[in-house]
Amino acid sequence: MSITVSGDFIGHVHRLYFASLDYLLTKKGVRHGINGVAVDGLPAYVMAVASVEAFMNEAFLSMLPRFALKNSSAWNLPDDWLEKTELSVKLVLVPQLLFGKTFARGEQPYQDMMLLIRVRNDLIHYKMPNNVPKYIADLGQKDIILVAPSAKVDGSDYLWPDKLSCSEGIRWANNTACAIVHHLVSFVEFDYKKMIEGIASNFRKIEIEEVLRWFTTHGIDPDSHDPEKR
């Protein structure tokens, strides 16, 4: 009997997000609008990437597709070659081999997925560097990370790992993984699509409406800043 694990990984990211919102109720951490500090935020980026790789392996490289799609040219490659390929390449190559369709590398959701992989790699290989990754500024412009109010006044800001340790960062990681998985499923045709839709159903985006509903339910103004800390 076989089981899937991709749902466990993305489910953990989902739970980390709502745990970060619950932490806001303690008023122990900074919050800027709907984005607040997440004390356990960094593992979310790692788990989100792991969930996508696990889904790729389950849906497209396991015995299931080898049986259902047995005439694909993908199986002419060495057995372990695709599995050892970097995820960024695997995401483009595998659907092309199996279905003749793939991601446009200069468009979404592929671009966000590549950025998520970069974040994950920088965290996994973290060596306490002095330099700040270039993508931090881009994420700040999109309100995905925490930016201290004082940054606009005197330039002082949070350290970049702390900037990533936030609720909106977790939500972005979750939604990026979900978007890439459902886009992968859109490439699939015939009866095989029905076979993997159940696995993909574990990948649920956290939409802004759900976020605002949480704030309303808990009597918090989503536009407020509480507590006001640097």
Image (cartoon, rainbow, N blue to C red):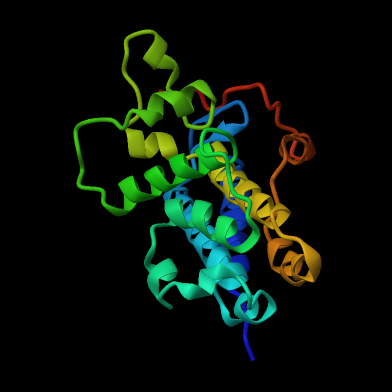
> x%, y% of residue 15?
61, 57
In terms of depth relative to the viewer, which is nearer, 158 or 1?
Answer: 1
Residue depicted at 69% across the width and 53% down the height: 182
Residue ranking furthest to the bottom: 1
> x%, y% of residue 213?
78, 38
Q: Is residue 82 above or below residue 13?
A: below
Residue depicted at 72% across the width and 40% down the height: 207
Q: Is residue 32 above or below residue 1?
A: above
**Which quadrant would the C terminus be assigned to in this image?**
top left
Q: On the picture, is 118 further left or further right than 11?
A: left
Quarter of the rendering containing residue 206: top right
Q: Is residue 134 above or below residue 211?
A: above
> x%, y% of residue 146?
47, 29
Quarter of the rendering containing residue 193: bottom right
**Which quadrant would the N terminus be assigned to in this image?**
bottom right
Residue ranking furthest to the top: 153
> x%, y% of residue 27?
55, 37
Q: Is residue 26 visible?
A: no
Residue depicted at 63% across the width and 75% down the height: 71
